[in-house]
């Protein structure tokens, strides 16, 4: 079986993505310029307010999950900014303050026993209720990423991976500086790190995902980023990675149990295919939380990944993987071009 894995690796043109922070690949000067801001080894400065911010476009809005994504600029600066506003769940600890004289009620509807009000806090109640994520300076890719768009389901065979996906990935500049900043402790406070196994081969850093507000356990969202460089995605995984994958599974479960008192049967550990960032990482979410990307078209349970590889060491070099690609994703355009499909 192992020999077969090597054979497959040879069949699939060797990846030029060496997964180093300063990687450059064949691309137009325009593109290099477009993405330059992200390849620099730096951490953007902390904003104090949105003073001088001008909203140029609403990229996405979702009344169900009460979020809105915007694109805009700060006065006197030409850099793009993407701002994600998401209303957060009510922290149980704030309920007694919310249901008190500190909130005035403005009636909106009154009918028989039913009434609806606008609840207006008179002062700071100790929780903002709005999670605000700022990507600044943002590239055009960020603007695309957060823009509402149609998606298409693509069945990627292993040949498609070798002939379409991998060459496409090799042409791109992968902006994973944020990953290296975390691994090298250049960004995100060290105390945010939930756990670290420093082993170069099988170690990883476990920390809160950017999407988690770190307040509610029921939408717990952590991400485990492996120390080893060069593993782009599920497609690269084979029997040699089993110790790494088992280590991530076992230690994440243990640490989450110890730190957050969440049992392993309440945790969902999974990988995305396609991921947004091609450096191996595992999503760790509460099973009750319907996290974006935790559905069948994107998430692959870590336990299934491990078992599939145990059953067939080169499973992910052979399996057709179905994934969702967004309309503006260049990879979708490439699939359509090669397959002679029109939008
Ligand atoms: O789709 P993909 O499997 O590549 O998921 C990447 C995950 O990384 C997403 O869940 C993001 O929310 C998370 N993420 C992205 N960035 C840029 C950061 C970051 O700077 N810090 C943290 N903690 N998580 C991030």
Image (cartoon, rainbow, N blue to C red):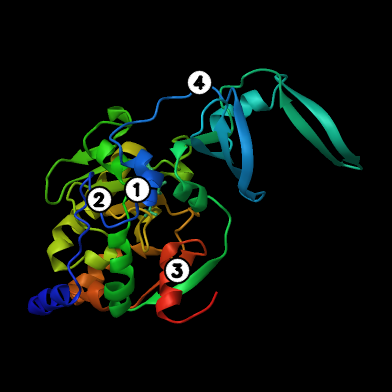
Alpha carbons under labels 1 and 4: distance apart:
30 Å
The residue positioned 34% from the left and 53% from the top of the image is 277
Instruction: Classify 10 Å Cα crowding around label 2: few (below 14), some (14-19), many (20 and above).
Output: some
| Residue 300, visible in the rendered structure | yes
Q: Which residue bears the numbered disc 4?
A: 48
Q: Which residue bears the numbered disc 2?
A: 24
| Residue 296, visible in the rendered structure | no
Numbered badge on residue 332:
3
Q: Nearer the viewer, residue 263 or 335?
A: 335
| Disc nearest the viewer among 4 and 2 | 2
State the residue lying farthest toward the right: 112
Instruction: Classify 10 Å Cα crowding around label 3: few (below 14), some (14-19), many (20 and above).
Output: many
State the residue lying farthest toward the front: 29
Q: Are marks 4 and 2 in contact (CB under 8 Å)?
A: no
Q: Position of residue 306 (x, y in %)?
A: 23, 66
Describe residue 16's horizontal placement relative to residue 99 as left or right.
left
Using the image, determine if residue 145 lies above or below residue 52.
below
Who comes first in sequence, dot 4 or dot 2? 2
The residue positioned 63% from the left and 50% from the top of the image is 62
Alpha carbons under labels 4 and 2: distance apart:
34 Å
| Disc nearest the viewer among 3 and 4 | 3
Using the image, determine if residue 15 lies above or below residue 255.
below
Q: Are marks 1 and 2 in contact (CB under 8 Å)?
A: yes
Alpha carbons under labels 3 and 2: distance apart:
22 Å
Who comes first in sequence, dot 3 or dot 4? 4
């Amino acid at each position: 079986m192992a020999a077969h894995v090597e054979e497959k690796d040879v069949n699939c043109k060797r990846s030029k993505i060496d997964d180093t922070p300063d990687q450059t690949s064949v691309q137009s000067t325009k593109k290099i310029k477009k993405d330059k801001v992200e390849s620099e080894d730096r951490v953007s400065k902390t904003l104090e307010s949105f003073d001088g911010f001008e909203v140029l476009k609403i990229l996405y809005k979702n009344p169900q999950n009460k979020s809105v994504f915007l694109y805009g600029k700060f006065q006197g600066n030409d850099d793009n900014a993407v701002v994600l506003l998401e209303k957060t769940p009510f922290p149980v600890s704030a309920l007694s303050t919310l249901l008190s004289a500190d909130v005035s009620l403005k009636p909106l509807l009154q009918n028989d026993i039913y009434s609806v009000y606008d609840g207006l806090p008179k002062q700071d109640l100790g929780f903002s209720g709005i999670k605000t994520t700022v990507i600044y300076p943002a590239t055009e890719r960020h603007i695309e990423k957060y823009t509402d768009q149609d998606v298409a389901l693509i069945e990627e065979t292993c040949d498609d991976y070798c002939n379409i996906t991998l060459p496409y990935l090799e042409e791109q500049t992968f902006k994973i500086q944020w990953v290296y900043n975390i691994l090298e402790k250049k960004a995100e406070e060290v105390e945010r790190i939930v756990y670290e196994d420093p082993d170069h081969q099988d170690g990883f850093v476990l920390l809160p995902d950017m999407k988690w507000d770190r307040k509610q356990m029921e939408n717990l969202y952590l991400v485990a980023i492996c120390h080893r460089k060069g593993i782009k995605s599920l497609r690269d995984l084979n029997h040699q990675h089993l110790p790494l994958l088992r280590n991530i599974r076992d230690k994440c479960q243990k640490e989450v149990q110890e730190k957050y008192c969440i049992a392993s049967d309440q945790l969902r550990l999974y990988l995305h295919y396609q991921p947004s960032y091609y450096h191996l990482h595992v999503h760790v979410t509460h099973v009750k939380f319907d996290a974006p990307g935790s559905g069948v078209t994107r998430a692959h349970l870590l336990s299934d990944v491990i078992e599939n590889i145990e059953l067939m060491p080169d499973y992910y070099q052979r399996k057709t993987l179905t994934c969702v690609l967004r309309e503006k994703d260049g990879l979708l355009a490439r699939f359509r071009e090669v397959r002679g499909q029109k939008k």
